[in-house]
Amino acid sequence: MQHPLEFIPQYVRKPMFYTFFALTVLIFGVFSAAEPFLRTPAAPSGIVSFELARDVNTAQSMIDSWDANARLYAAFGLGFDYLFMPTYALALSLGLLLASSNKTGFYHTFAAWMGWGAFAAALFDAVENYALWKELINGAFSPYPEIAAFCATIKFMLLIVGLITALSSRLFRN
């Protein structure tokens, strides 16, 4: 299995990683600034609660718990997230590429798979955001909370496994 970014020349990989990592942190900071407006008793984890609502009643109670200002923050965040998706996918995929560059065998192959997984996570994120947007604009109705929760779960799993894989490269000798 070949990593999706293997075509990038060696000397460019590290600077690209640092660039996309910095952008990821910056954009995440923008999201974090809006998060307190989205935390309510119905949505204790803000937008993440909404992403993982799983059913119409739970999702609608979260929407209802947000005032007009909070709904604007949520709408802005959903739109802004489309800029975040390629940024975090490139940062994670490049991190995996760097982590596996001197490795062979299982780790190298798994890191290549997770490099693709970073981009798959961004695609799941895009579908999730569309479902959340439909709920935010039209009210929660099936199947959108279910679609959003499914996509968010897969997205988070891919990102967490990818991050653990990249950070664990030192555990593998070759």
Image (tube, grey):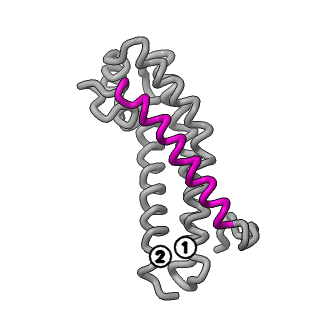
Query: The N terminus is located in which quarter?
Result: bottom right
Residue at the bottom extreme? Answer: 174
Indicate the secondary structure of the residue bearing disc 1.
helix
Task: Give whichever of discs 1 and 2 has the lower sequence position.
Answer: 1
Q: Residues within 10 Å of mark 2 (few under 14, many from 20)?
A: many
Q: Position of residue 150 (x, y in %)?
A: 43, 43
- For disc 2, the marked residue is 169
Indicate the secondary structure of the residue bearing disc 2.
helix
Q: Which residues are magenta?
A: 13-37
Q: Main secondary structure of the magenta part?
A: helix
Q: CA distance from mark 1 to mark 2?
A: 6 Å
**Vertical side of 8 occupied by 80: above or below:** above
In-front residue for pair 9/85: 9
Left or right, 73 with respect to 39, comes to right
Mark identifier at residue 99: 1
Q: Position of residue 151 (x, y in %)?
A: 48, 43
Residue drawn at 62 percent across, 60 percent down: 17
Residue drawn at 57 percent across, 32 percent down: 80
User: What amino acid does circle 1 point to?
Assistant: Ala
Residue drawn at 50 percent across, 17 percent down: 137
Check if residue 148 falls in the magenta segment.
no
In-front residue for pair 171/116: 171
Check if residue 16 falls in the magenta segment.
yes
Left or right, 12 with respect to 72, comes to right
Q: Residues within 10 Å of mark 1 (few under 14, many from 20)?
A: some
Looking at the image, do the residues carrying marks 1 and 2 touch, with CB atoms under 8 Å apart? yes
Residue at the top extreme? Answer: 68
Q: Position of residue 40 (x, y in %)?
A: 28, 24
User: What amino acid does circle 2 point to?
Assistant: Ser
Residue drawn at 31 percent across, 17 percent down: 65
Mark identifier at residue 39: none
Q: Position of residue 119 (x, y in %)?
A: 60, 54
